[in-house]
Amino acid sequence: MATIVLFGGPSDERHVSVASAQNIVRALGAPLAWFWAPDGPVHDVAIDDLLAHQRPFEIDFQPKRPAIWPNIEQALDTLPVDDPVFLLALHGSVGEDGTLQRMMEQRGIAFTGSGSVASAAAFDKEHAKDTLRDRVRMPESRVVRGPQTIREMLDEYDRVVLKPVPGGSSRGLVFVNRGEDFHIDASVPYLVEQFIAGRELTVGVVDQGDGPFALPVLEVEVDAGRSFDYAGKYLGTGSHEICPANISDSMRESTQDVGLAAHTTLACEGYSRTDVVAADDDHIYFLELNTLPGLTTASLLPQELRAAGIDFRGFLERQVELARQRAAVSFRA
């Protein structure tokens, strides 16, 4: 039985994926590592080559070995090892939106994280908010049907946030103030959301076999005039994180309750991370849930695991074991 760390993929979040894979293989020691190239082929990667790659958040990983399979479907159809578990170090698009998960479910292959239905539901921000609307408080939002939708929101609110409906790693966020000119990519579906001023908090939820529980809350402090974008999250520019967050017990409990509600309502498995904002009135507003949050050395969930006293290697090994158990139950069904 082998563990295969799958990373890369066609998403624009593949740089984060490479960094997650590096952190994972350092912790596990000697798993197999497969790189899914952005143009489709799949490479079996030497661990030393992966770990030798520098500045993964900025520079594309170039595998030294030639591709073994022309696409991910053939890789899954001709597995070179018996009964593997795929430890998914993928972020964004087909690696996180349920597409890959559905491929694996159809083939009876074990994988970590949420199944295809939960992955698809959480990745689509509009669908996730519709599903959670009766469970958690959230900002007003609408799907952009054109510039008029944004103007209508700016008639009601001083500031709005444009978010790509499918996406993560804080890529593609656009902040627009009332009276400002704005330009959007017409080819990308956006959600226009009321901007809520307050403290930016995030909370991981983990299931290690006894049911999901919330990790310590982390706060992101952003420098004046900056937003928690890709550079802030992964390049250390304009923000820093505090874990556990220096917040009241009631705010901590409310944030953890929102994370647990989002995780369970969307039927997530294994682990997830929910982002919220604590407004000045102390209400907690749900922003989004990530089913495959980053596992890099700079990522938020690993910081929360450390604050909870949970060993990263132990966490990964437990996720692999749970994936194997879930697959075994599915096969019997």
Image (cartoon, grey):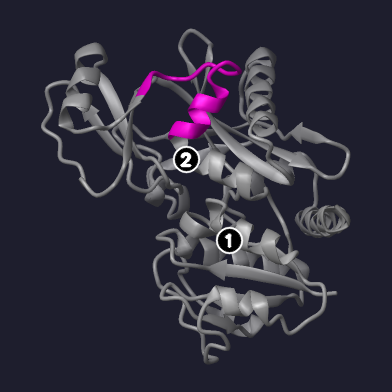
| Label disc, if present, on residue 21 of the rendered structure | none
Position above or below: 10 against 239: below
Residue type indicated by callout 2? Asp
Position above or below: 45 against 172: below
Q: Which residue is mark 2?
A: 124
Position above or below: 100 against 263: below
Residue at 40% x, 40% y: name it: 228
Q: Position of residue 226 (x, y in %)?
A: 32, 37
Position above or below: 159 against 93: above
Marked residue nearer the N-terminal end (1 or 2)? 1
Front-lying residue, 44 or 222 = 44
Q: Would residue 136 be seen by someone viewing this image from the given angle? A: yes
Q: Which residue is mark 1?
A: 100
Q: Quadrant of residue 255?
A: top right
Residue at 82% x, 78% y: name it: 82
Residue type indicated by callout 1? Leu
Q: Quadrant of residue 30?
A: bottom right
Where disc 1 sits, the SS reads helix
Q: Is residue 129 magenta?
A: yes
Residue at 46% x, 36% y: name it: 125
Q: Which residues are magenta?
A: 126-141
Q: Does residue 333 appear to the left or right of 292 in the view shown?
A: right
Where disc 2 sits, the SS reads loop
Q: Is residue 159 magenta?
A: no
The span from disc 1 to disc 2 (Cα, nearest Å) is: 15 Å
Q: Would residue 287 be seen by someone viewing this image from the given angle? A: no
Q: Position of residue 249 (x, y in %)?
A: 69, 16
Q: Residue furthest top?
A: 281
